[in-house]
């Protein structure tokens, strides 16, 4: 049987692992200014998954992206943008959701959804998952649904070649 000390040390180690994993610690507001700021401030590739809390395909898409990006180890980051939750309204369940915990940043729409979607892409009507593959100095690649591994490799290779 484990001692109380062993249990406390195990719990402390688990907390350190979760903290070191890069899981988001807060839900950030995604406003009309966020999209251009994300693109302008890029120093490394960033995959942005637009999702909703009831999207059936989004968890697998997010986890697939996280798996590819973490295997690549090229500094690429992953963000999720939840379109049907407001930041500050009920952040704890979002932060505890396993497929959001594999992202580096977690946003929630803060404003009128149609206007925020238009800011990302005027032709986008809100189908999720909607993935934006961003790279410094390159136009965004926009994908409806889960990007294939080949699409992700091409995006990462192009970003590395710049």
Image (cartoon, rainbow, N blue to C red):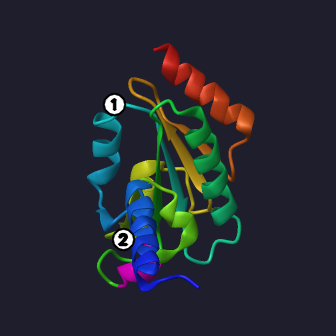
Which residue position holds label 2? 112
> Closest to the observer: 61 or 127?
61
Q: Secondary structure at mark 2?
A: loop
Asked whether the viewer can see residue 114, the reply is no
Q: Does residue 91 belong to the magenta stretch?
A: yes
> Closest to the observer: 23 or 125?
23
135 on left or right of 42: right
Q: Quadrant of residue 44?
A: top left
Write the residue at 61% across / 78% down: 54
> Closest to the observer: 65 or 50?
65
Q: Is residue 7 above or below residue 20?
A: below
Magenta stretch: dominant SS? helix
Residue 53 x, y percent position in the rendering = 55, 76
Which residue position holds label 1? 43
Write the residue at 69% across / 60% down: 60
Residue 122 x, y percent position in the rendering = 48, 50
Q: Quadrant of the N terminus?
A: bottom right
Q: Secondary structure at mark 1?
A: loop
């Amino acid at each position: 049987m484990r001692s109380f000390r062993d249990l406390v040390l195990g719990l402390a180690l688990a907390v350190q692992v979760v903290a070191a994993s890069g899981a988001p610690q807060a839900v950030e507001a995604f406003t009309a200014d966020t999209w251009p700021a994300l693109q302008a401030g890029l120093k490394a590739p960033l995959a942005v998954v637009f999702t909703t809390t009831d999207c059936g395909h989004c968890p697998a898409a997010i986890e697939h992206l996280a798996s590819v990006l973490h295997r690549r180890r090229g500094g690429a980051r992953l963000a999720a943008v939840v379109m049907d939750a407001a930041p500050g309204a009920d952040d704890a369940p979002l932060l505890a959701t396993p497929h959001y915990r594999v992202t580096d940043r977690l946003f929630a729409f803060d404003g009128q959804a149609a206007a925020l979607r238009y800011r990302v892409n005027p032709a986008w009507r809100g189908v999720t998952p909607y993935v934006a593959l961003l790279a410094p100095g390159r136009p965004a690649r926009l994908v409806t649904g889960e990007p294939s591994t080949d699409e992700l490799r091409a995006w990462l290779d192009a970003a590395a070649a710049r």
